[in-house]
Image: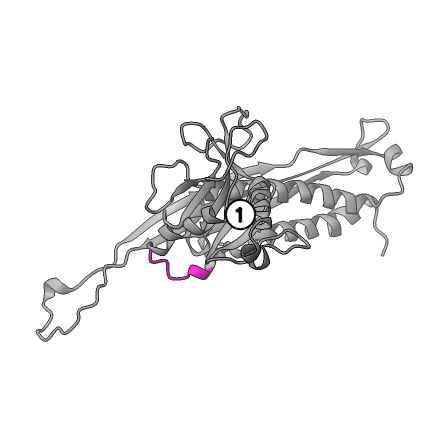
Amino acid sequence: MAFSNGEYIKKFILPALVHTLQNLQQDFLAVIPNAPKAALNSSGINVHKVGNPISVDWDKMDAYVDGDRKTFDVENNTIPWQYFSTTPSMTDSEEIRTSALNRGGILKQKHGEAIVVSWVEKNIHALAPDDDTDPQFNPVFETTGPDRGDGSGTRRMLLTDVIKAMLPYQKMNLTKMGELYMILSPEHLNDLCLDALGQQAFRDIFIKTMSGEPVPHHGWKFFINNASVKYAVDGTKKAIGAAAVGTDRVASTIFYAPHAIKAIYNVKQHYTSMEEDTRNNPPIDELRFTGNATVGKLYEIGFGAIKDGNV
């Protein structure tokens, strides 16, 4: 069965992209739990936080009385959606006539890449603490190495910084320590590679010499991403896209996966084909995607960051 250009894109290319976006397993996103469909509504993700009042009594011989019984406190919250939209793309019949590229594939690839990059950045930003005021449950550490030497006045990250950062999380009684992750910024990955070069014992167990990737080490599992959080001089997290200043400090993000949750919802394609264009000459088509997405914290414990220390 033959399809016109517009029919083919609507029937095959666009639904495939929608499916891809709703089932992203890109990089560290694969370890952040997806919200169950039953928890999604028009407002966001319904979250039920259940407290644990249960304690254990040893060598108790007397009977329990009514006042000993405990009830579970349930806190109902909603993590609100954030609306997203891709910039509309436009092509015309002359561009298609003179191009050897697969137009349908390019449309899917470019819009998909833009959403994935933005969604990854949004997740990293949401997982990092808003500030450095909660050292017990959401600590923000500082690097302690020598001057990075690039004029920024910042210290390099050392392997000892990574090891020392584990201690607060060990004290939090997190039940699944194997799901504690660090997303290294490019700067911090480079710092660790340089530090490992001078330490034979660490180099052989911490860094894959062929790829430069860190392997799980001292309880940490690592991801690497070009997107990174920045903290202002007052210790507060800067907004995505905020203007950079010389006192900003790059950070690597720490997160305990069972306490995080994410969802992409109601993704829609908006497409007008050139076959339907009655005004422009040559005819054009336009495409964009819209939807709702969010990432949040089920419990405000088990997150953190390591930011550049000052020289």
Residue picked out by circle 1: 183
Q: Main secondary structure of the magenta part?
A: loop
Q: Where does residue 280 sit, x and y in percent of width and height?
A: 81, 27
Q: Secondary structure at mark 1?
A: strand
Q: Please indicate whether residue 279 sits to the left or right of residue 144 in the image.
A: right
Magenta segment boundaries in residue numbering: 172-178
Residue 48 versus residue 153: which sits nearer the camera? 153
Residue 19 versus residue 132: which sits nearer the camera? 132
Q: Residue at x 51, y 42 (%)?
A: 157
What's the coloring here? one colour
Q: Residue furthest right?
A: 98
Q: Where does residue 196 sit, x and y in percent of width and height?
A: 57, 50
Q: Residue at x 78, y 38 (%)?
A: 273
Amino acid on which disc 1 is placed: Ile
Q: Kindly tell me whether residue 43 is visible in this rendering.
A: no
Q: Residue at x 63, y 45 (%)?
A: 116
Q: Where does residue 210 sit, x and y in percent of width and height?
A: 68, 55
Q: Where does residue 208 sit, x and y in percent of width and height?
A: 63, 56
Above or below for 189 versus 176: above
Q: Please indicate whether residue 67 sits to the left or right of residue 300 in the image.
A: left
Circle 1 Cα neighbour tier, 10 Å, few/some/many (<14 / 14–19 / ≥20):
many
Q: Please indicate whether residue 202 sits to the left or right of residue 304 in the image.
A: right
Q: Is residue 150 magenta?
A: no
Q: Residue at x 33, y 55 (%)?
A: 171
For the N terminus, the quadrant is: bottom right
Q: Is residue 177 magenta?
A: yes
Q: Kindly tell me whether residue 179 is visible in this rendering.
A: yes
